[in-house]
């Protein structure tokens, strides 16, 4: 899995930062690190344990200290901080960039910005933004729908009825996230599925074509993102198929190195797949709360056998 990054230009544009230094080539520098560096110790000349790949924020304390530094100490500190690996520097709370720092940045073609926003506020927003932007991502072929507050991805070969099943569930009051393709990211310890921009609100029904779910069933029937909690694979029912009777197979679907519970549901014309999925999700939620009907059945069976003996 390749390490994700965004350009310093994308970051600056997102937060509306004021440009002070750096040409087009400098604006292409990449941000790989989610965390922000406020270089208090580095300004004093202590460079051990510094992470040079982090974006630098200069707040009131750092700015005040810089104003009292000697020029030779500023040069020494900035030669270390303005490394090739560092994506840029942001002066917060309307603090002006020291002329010597701006001169050094010009010589190095190093990106420097300014903002009127408070340092702590911008740091929180920046880390949240970078955490999401730099999270591992992939796309899967399937349909993501929210059923009883549970994110369910319907898998199966083309034509098996994923979209039709999603339509049935929507009519029952559940919400569509994405049909046909789901963009998946691993964000803050959780898998999140999102709708690609092209497919927002859209669902393909064979024989009808593309329909707009929000227009047909109301805006409350769609949602643009949701956690992925369960995979349900739809497969055609065949006479030779071995069907799990007790429901204790413990299968998983692996995505972005995360294992998510997987249930396989055989599909025939006589089965209401929407009803079965509702039952599967309810049973899944009960298991998460500690109640396992399979275990309960096995305990009853064992008790009955003990009595007969």
Image (cartoon, rainbow, N blue to C red):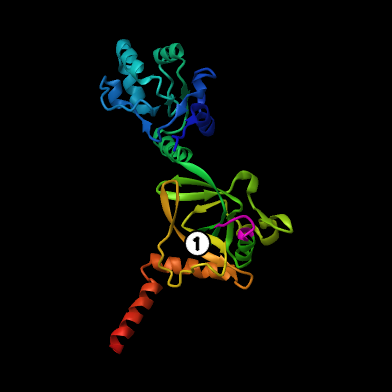
Image point (44%, 30%), residue name: 31
- Viewed as shown, does residue 109 lie left or right of 162? left
Write down the region rendered in magenta: 155-163
> Between 162 and 70, which is closer to the camera in this rendering?
162
At 60% from the left edge and 56% from the top edge, which residue is drawn?
Answer: 222
Q: Would residue 162 appear left or right of 103 to someone viewing this image?
A: right
Q: Is residue 148 visible?
A: no
When the figure is inspected, residue 276 is found, relative to residue 88, above or below; the finding is below
Is 100 in the magenta? no
Residue 245 x, y percent position in the rendering? 45, 72
* Quarter of the rendering occupied by the N terminus: top left
Q: Is residue 65 above or below residue 5?
A: above
Secondary structure beneath disc 1? loop
Q: Which residue is mark 1?
A: 149
Q: Position of residue 226 (x, y in %)?
A: 51, 53
- Report crowding for label 1: few under 14, some 14 to 19, many 20 or more residues within 10 A (C-alpha): some
Main SS, magenta region, reads loop
Instruction: Choose between 84 and 17: the one closer to the eye.
Output: 84
Q: Quadrant of residue 68?
A: top left
Q: Residue at x 70, y 60 (%)?
A: 216
Q: Is residue 159 magenta?
A: yes
The answer, for residue 122, to whether it is visible in the render is: yes
Estimate the x, y position of residue 104 in percent, counting from the top left.
41, 13
């Amino acid at each position: 899995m390749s390490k994700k990054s965004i350009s310093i230009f994308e970051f600056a544009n997102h937060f509306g930062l004021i440009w002070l230094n750096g040409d087009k080539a400098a604006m292409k520098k990449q941000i790989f690190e989610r965390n922000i560096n406020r270089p208090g110790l580095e300004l004093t000349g202590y460079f051990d344990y510094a992470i040079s790949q982090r974006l630098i924020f200069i707040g009131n304390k750092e700015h005040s200290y810089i104003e009292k530094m000697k020029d030779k100490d500023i040069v020494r500190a900035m030669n270390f901080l303005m490394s090739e690996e560092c994506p840029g520097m942001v002066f917060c709370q309307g603090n002006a960039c020291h002329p010597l720092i701006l001169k050094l940045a010009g010589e190095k073609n190093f990106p420097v910005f300014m903002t009127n926003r408070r340092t702590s506020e911008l740091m929180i927003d920046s880390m949240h933004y970078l955490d999401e932007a730099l999270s591992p991502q992939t796309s899967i072929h399937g349909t993501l729908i929210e059923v009883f507050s549970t994110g369910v991805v319907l898998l199966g070969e083309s034509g098996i009825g994923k979209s039709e099943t999603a339509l049935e569930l929507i009519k029952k009051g559940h919400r569509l996230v994405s049909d046909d393709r789901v963009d998946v990211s691993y964000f803050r310890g959780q898998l999140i599925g999102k709708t690609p921009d092209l497919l927002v609100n859209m669902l393909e029904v064979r024989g009808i074509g593309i329909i707009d779910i929000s227009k047909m069933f109301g805006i409350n029937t769609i949602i643009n993102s949701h956690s992925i909690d369960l995979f349900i694979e739809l497969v055609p029912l065949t006479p030779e198929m071995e069907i799990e009777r007790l429901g204790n197979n413990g299968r998983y679907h692996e995505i972005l190195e995360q294992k998510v519970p997987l249930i396989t549901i055989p599909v025939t014309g006589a089965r209401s797949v929407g009803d079965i999925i509702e039952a599967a999700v309810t049973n899944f939620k009960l298991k998460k709360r500690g109640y396992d009907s399979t275990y309960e059945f096995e305990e009853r069976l064992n008790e009955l056998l003990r009595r007969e003996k």
